[in-house]
Image (tube, helix red, strand yellow):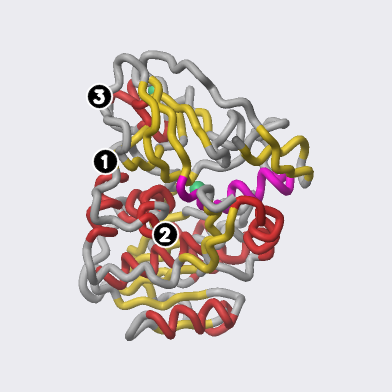
Amino acid sequence: MYGLFLKNPSDLELREFASIPTLQDDEVKLRLIYGGICGSDVNVYKGKIEHASYPVSPGHELVGEIVQTGANVKENIGQRVVIQPNSFCGECNYCKSGQTNICPEKKSLGVNVNGGFVQEFVISSKYVLPVPEELANEKAVLIEPFAVIVHAFKKVSITQGTTVAIIGCGAEGMLAVALANHLGANITAVDINQEKLNKVQSHYNGIKTCLPEDVEAGKFDVVIEAAGAKQSFEQGVDILKPGGAMVVVGMAPKAELPVTRMVRKELTLYGSIIYNFPDDFLISIEYLQEEDFNVQPIISEILPLNEYKKAYEYAASGQYGKIILNFQEA
Ligand SMILES: [Zn+2]
Ligand SMILES: [Zn+2]
């Protein structure tokens, strides 16, 4: 079977891997269907993540079908599943309270432990979740990246009429637009790329879009920062109303904060990292199952595994939405 292998930053190749014949009692073997390329995969590829280790098999946004099970696995062969790609200990106080995302033992597939852009992937069954039969693969592959947004939205209250600015219209930003729109928020989508703004305009009704320089300050109840740039973070703080809150999903390495102004306006900042499992995955699946929940514009391209170079190039260019690898058409 074939899979991707990242020897060093920028040194990505398609290799043949030996199939793993015997599984541990708790493990399942998946035949992969789709794998989404995440911003973190691009950053590992570019050598921009400090805690990444090489060589590594990249990839963590995975949908597959169970083809083999260990002795103690309750899922059946043939079941389609999505995986939760961040391991946790299950025993610390964070894990016990459901906060698996901040477990100190957390490891991330495709970053500091081998990931799953391989045709056959073996993982503990504690990290798989069944995909409902009626959910198409094109939506199932969004369960994991969308769970990030589900988690972020839990930090604040977004309902009918809440004024929300979403800064950054990449895949995560677009998923935030989709959810805020679904919840009836009054949305302004912000990006430096006019084409991405046009895409938002053409797929969602009643959303204001603008370039960063055109956003009015002091207007928003909630800001979702999904661009991960210093300027976006700083602008996010500027454009909040008094009493407003910003949820930061993007990862700008550093930014400056106008502390006095923040204190005087009683602003709140939330960091939001990945999701809690399985709760946020279950909510993600629920939304994705709703017919009028519009995620149609999120995926830009689905490419066969052997076109991985093109797929990474697209993903790294920042000009596209989500790029998906198809492992069944290699
Ligand atoms: Zn991801
Ligand atoms: Zn833990």
Q: Nearer the viewer, residue 128 or 90?
A: 128
Instruction: Give the side of residue 37 with respect to residue 44, left or right.
Output: left
The amino acid on which the numbered mark 2 sits, given as a three-letter code, is Met
**137 relative to 303 in the view: left or right:** left
Q: Is residue 259 left or right of residue 205?
A: right
Q: Which residue is mark 2?
A: 246
Specify the label residue 279 is tagged with: 1
Badge 3 amino acid: Lys
Of label 1 and label 2, which has the lower sequence position?
Answer: 2
Q: Nearer the viewer, mark 2 or mark 3?
A: 3
Residue shown at 40%/48% (left/top)? 144
Which label's residue is closer to the chain start, 3 or 1? 3
The image quadrant where one finds ligand 2 is top left
Q: Give the extent of the magenta segment.
A: 33-48
Q: Nearer the viewer, residue 58 or 171?
A: 58
Report whether the residue tagged 2 is closer than 8 Å to ligand 1: no
Q: Position of residue 240 (x, y in %)?
A: 41, 69
Q: Is residue 232 above or below residue 36?
A: below
Residue at horizontal 56%, vertical 57%? 257
Q: Which comes sooner in the sequence, label 2 or label 3?
A: 3
Left or right position of 106 against 184 = right
Near mark 3 (Cα within 10 A), the count class, few <14, some 14-19 or many ≥20, is few
Residue appearing at x 48%, y 27% in the figure: 122
Name the amino acid, label 1.
Answer: Asp
Q: Is residue 45 magenta?
A: yes
Q: Which residue is mark 3?
A: 74
Check residue 37 for magenta coloring: yes
Which numbered mark, 1 or 2, is in the foreground of this view? 1
